[in-house]
Image: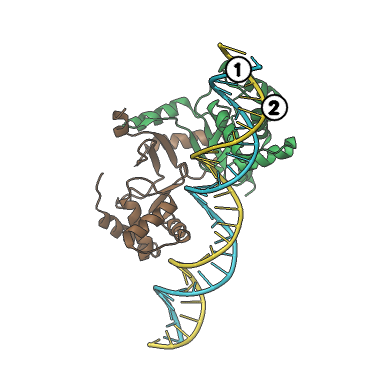
Chain colours: A brown, B green, C cyan, D yellow
Amino acid sequence: MTNVDTDKVLQQAERSCVEHGARLTSKRKHILEVLLNAKAPRSAYEIAELYRQQTDENIPVMSVYRMLDFLMQNSLVHKLASNNKFIACAHIACSHSHQTPQFLICDKCHQVREIGVDKQLIHALEESIEHNHFQLNSPQLELHGLCETCQEQR
Amino acid sequence: MTNVDTDKVLQQAERSCVEHGARLTSKRKHILEVLLNAKAPRSAYEIAELYRQQTDENIPVMSVYRMLDFLMQNSLVHKLASNNKFIACAHIACSHSHQTPQFLICDKCHQVREIGVDKQLIHALEESIEHNHFQLNSPQLELHGLCETCQEQR
DNA sequence: TAAATTATGATATATCATATCATTTCAATC
DNA sequence: GATTGAAATGATATGATATATCATAATTTA
């Protein structure tokens, strides 16, 4: 799981964009790269700053937001609603099709794990919700707590 | 479910605060009242404005944030992380102890239903998460979609 | 009533996000 | 390869959400 080769992920992202007729420009790619290198979710402003550091090139925050929108539309990046930060999809290089992401967010070290919750479980959740006559958009779950490492440090 | 008597809820809130040695001041109570009267979640700034309209008295947004913090600590108000808005707890007047809230948020009319998801389901979700060696804080779920009314209007 | 605690006010500023119009880049067609 | 239309990016302004900090007022407790 750890230390996935960034280049491979970027190549796969490129392939996936070509397939869908989307243009992964070099700036968009750099934004994705920044997020792949980051150890925790980043805000748009943080991303702009990291971009500057890593490329010696200035980038307007406006552009960052637009590029993040593009990356999200292409399932390469997710936004965490609960802290207004962005994270690279953990499954870019996986072969299987992307399902709705579920996130475990550590409130101490801020690292995030993107997990696959049991499909049956999600399905049951959806059923329970349809009982309330509610039509679900996408059941992205964001769950806050403590990761393994931070639990041990107590 | 609809048209719960606001006064009764406020009385129950008062009782609950007394029990816990918390001071439900008149301003805090008014803030809660504003949210009880609102038909959808409101931002702190909206709450300040509604407060002005309903009491003919000015209130600094800073104070609103603090009062919301108080109300949240006492489980009288919840914050929706996915849209940065606040909502009165739907179960203030219920006898049963408060469990982790789950929200169905309509992306069209913005109304919110606070539901009780099946306990077993939540439990299963928690188990699945512990498999990932993650220690959950509180599994508040925010699910976006379309409510019954808005589905029909399509 | 004095002192301590808690609540609220006032001001400034940080942080997150969108609207809008201008400019540049890219890609298709001639 | 120049022309042109579409897409991407830049620049500027501003709105929306949130926190830090110090001052003042209200309430509780001794």
- Residue under circle 1? B18
Left or right: C21 with respect to A119? right
Neighbours of disc 1 within 10 Å: few (<14), some (14-19), many (20+): few
Q: In this view, does D28 lie above or below C10?
A: above
Left or right: A141 with respect to D29? left
Quick check: can you spot residue B122? yes
Query: In front: B99, or A145?
Result: A145
Q: Where is residue A131 in the image (x, y as percent from the top left)?
A: 54, 34
Mark 2, secondary structure of its residue: helix
Question: Looking at numbered disc 2 in the image, what kind of residue is underneath it?
Answer: Thr
- Chain for numbered disc 1: B
Quick check: can you spot residue B97? no
Q: In which quarter of the image is the N terminus of chain B?
A: top right
Q: Decide which of tag 2 and tag 1 comes sooner along the chain.
A: 2
Q: Where is residue A136 in the image (x, y as percent from the top left)?
A: 51, 42
- Chain for numbered disc 2: B
Q: Residue B95 carries which label?
A: none
Callout in the foreground (2, 1): 1
Question: Looking at numbered disc 1 in the image, what kind of residue is underneath it?
Answer: Val
Cβ–Cβ under 8 Å for marks 2 and 1 = no
Q: Where is residue A86 in the image (x, y as percent from the top left)?
A: 41, 49
